[in-house]
Amino acid sequence: MSSNIMWMIIGMGIVTYIPRMLPFVALSGMKLPAFLQGVLKNVPYATLGALIIPGIFTINEDIWFGIIGAAVAFAVAYMGVNVILVVLSAILGLSVYSYFF
């Protein structure tokens, strides 16, 4: 691997680390209002929705893959489950669908 690529990887790592580290350091001693804490708790689910919704409309083979994946993900997310489990449940639901159909 050339040194240019290594420096590029190191630079990208630094650029992505800084926005993650700054809020942690800046807000570490602060007590956030309950409303703001509630909003921040829902950010992972909003991000998940932003990733899934375009995939529903742009799927080429079978539109049911998008609809079933979204329905499973929304149902599990509504129950308040961890985001990783939401994604895994959507994958499992689509695996079951593709096995039977």
Image: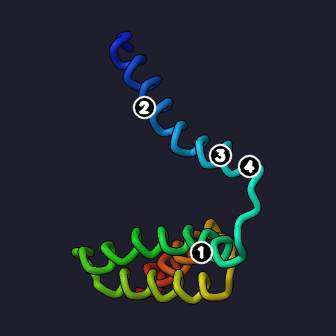
Q: Residue at x 74, y 49 (%)?
A: 28
| Residue at mark 1 to residue at mark 3: CA–CA distance | 18 Å
Q: Is residue 29 above or below residue 5?
A: below
**What secondary structure is found at the residue carrying circle 4?**
loop
Compared across the picture, whether 54 is left or right of 42 comes to left
Q: Residues within 10 Å of mark 4 (few under 14, many from 20)?
A: few
| Residue at mark 1 to residue at mark 2: CA–CA distance | 29 Å
Q: Residue at x 56, y 75 (%)?
A: 92
Q: Which mark is residue 12?
A: 2
- Residue where numbered disc 4 is placed: 28
- Residue where numbered disc 1 is placed: 39
- Residue where numbered disc 3 is placed: 26
Q: Is residue 29 visible?
A: yes
Q: Is residue 86 visible?
A: no
- Residue 71 pos. (x, y %): 48, 88
Which of the marked residues, 3 or 2, is nearer the chain's N terminus?
A: 2
